[in-house]
Structures are given as structure tokens and as C-alpha cells.
Image (spheres, rainbow, N blue to C red):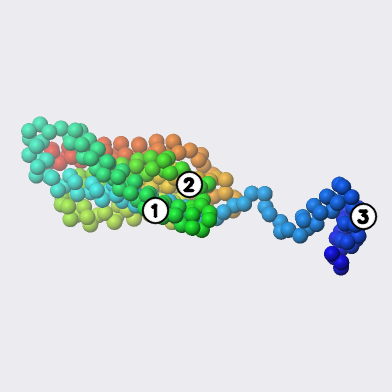
Amino acid sequence: LRGFTINLPGVGAVSLEDALSRAEGPGLDRALDYLIQESQPVIPAGLIVNPTYTYLVLFIVVIAVLWFGVNNSAKEIVKEEPIYARERGVNLQILPYLGSKFLILGVISAIQTALLMLLMFGSLELAGLWLGHQVPPAQYMLPYPAMFGVLVVTSLCGVALGLLLSACVNSPDRANALLPYVIIPQLILGGGVITVKSGVLFYLAALFSPVYWAFRAVRRGVPQLPSDFHWHLDYDDSVWICLAALAVQTMVLLALTGWFLKQKDEGNG
């Protein structure tokens, strides 16, 4: 302890040996507390972990889930066009036909979503156990059960989008060729590549991008980030708003699919 000095409030610079030899009771406690505080680095009251990698993982998962739904259904109607036309002549109704397709493909997409989450987040959880901390941080994403629900709704919206594409084309090859042009706008408007804050881009994303609403739903903590951070956005951080938007988009897509099928019937008639 010799050779070390400390600055005590109201006293000034004294040797550490002298301060400890004279201090008794509370005085010693104050001296030790002050010494510890002076020797430690400053730790902020609230530690903010950079959420970028967590958000990018979530964005990739959302894109993959939407692609499951679109890819599963994009050829489903057009490949059965001759059978559909014949069955329509025997009083097959559009609504039951479309509903059965949507239900079966939705179940398949939900199973694919569960497998993707198991592989993706299971691997990350194992890596977190090995590293000794949670990967990715839980404060920046929905809990897994709620996330699964959002992703299933997203995959159902993808199924509806794929059925619309299938109803609009005249061959399975054309449906395959148009798949990238369906997914690429979702990459741009989804909010993971370009931050969607306001203006025309926001309205386009809100109206035409299921990925925007799904990505907004599964990520957490965006409004609480520092205002100068590029991920920071001011909005109502409610999952229910996003689910309602996804449900509306799904219903609109299914209604448009039914309308296009009706137009095909009239054209064939």
C-alpha cells in the first residue's frame, strides 16, 4: 500500500496507508467504497446490445417463410386448369375449391415453418449454450411460440399470394418464371435491407408487403433504441396491428384470386 495516494472528498490527497490506518468503522467503509469506484471503469446504467444481426436473422426467416407459401401454391391452380374447367361444368364452386387449396397448402407451409424455426433457432440456441450467453438476444425478438404464430400467418399470406399468381398465368412454367418478381419487391419493401420510415416507401410497404408487417411483428425493441440509431423507428410496437394487416392482405389476395378464376370461367364460357 505504500506509495499510493487517494483523493478523499473534503480531505484532499492522502496516502492510502495513512487513510486505512486512521479509518475506523464507517470511515473505512467510505474509503474502500471510494477506492473501488475510482479503480473501476464506468458502466452505463442501461447496456444496449447492437440488434443488427438479430434483426437480419429475423428478416431472413420472414422472407423464407413467405417464399414457402408462395412456392407451394404458385403452380397449384394453373397445373389443374383442364380438370378445374371440367369440374366447373359439374357445378364445382369457386369458394370451396379455393378454400380447400388454401387449407391444405397452409398446413404444409406451417409444417415447413416449424422445421425452419427448429433448425435456425435450435442451432443458435446450441451455439449460445457453447458461448455462454443467449444468441440471439431475447429482448430483440418475439418469444418463440408467438413468433411461430406470426410466421404461420405470414406463410398463409404467401399461400394466398401464390394462388393469385397461379390464377393469373396460363402455364406452370410462367408461374415459375414470375416467382422472383414476386419475392424481390418484398426484399425491398420489407424493411430489412432499406429502412422503411415514412413517405411513399412506407405506404407501398404497408399496402403491398406482407414481409413488412411480419418483420415488424417478430422484432422487438425498435422504438426503445437510441433515436440516432439507424434501426430506430417510432411506431406502435403491437403484434396485433401487424397480424390484422396480414389478415387483411390475405383476404384481399384470396378475393382477387376468386375474381380472376371467375373471369377465366366467363372467358372459357
* Disc 2 target residue: 141
Q: On the rendered structure, is 241 left or right of 18? A: left
Query: Residue 13 placed where, x, y %?
Result: 90, 61
Residue type at numbered disc 3:
Arg
Choose between 242 and 9: the one closer to the eye.
9
Residue at the image point whose x is 68% and y is 54% from the top: 43
Q: Could you tell me if the residues under marks 2 and 3 are in contact, i.e. CB atoms within 8 Å?
A: no
Residue 168 shows in the view: no
Residue type at numbered disc 1:
Met
Which dot, 2 or 3, sits closer to the camera?
3
* Disc 3 target residue: 22
Q: On the rendered structure, is 237 left or right of 87? A: right
Helix, strand or loop under label 3: helix
Helix, strand or loop under label 2: loop
The answer for how far apart the CA atoms under marks 1 and 2 are is 14 Å
Residue type at numbered disc 2:
Met
Residue with the most extreme bottom position: 3
Count of numbered marks: 3
Sequence-first disc among 1 and 3: 3
* Disc 1 target residue: 120
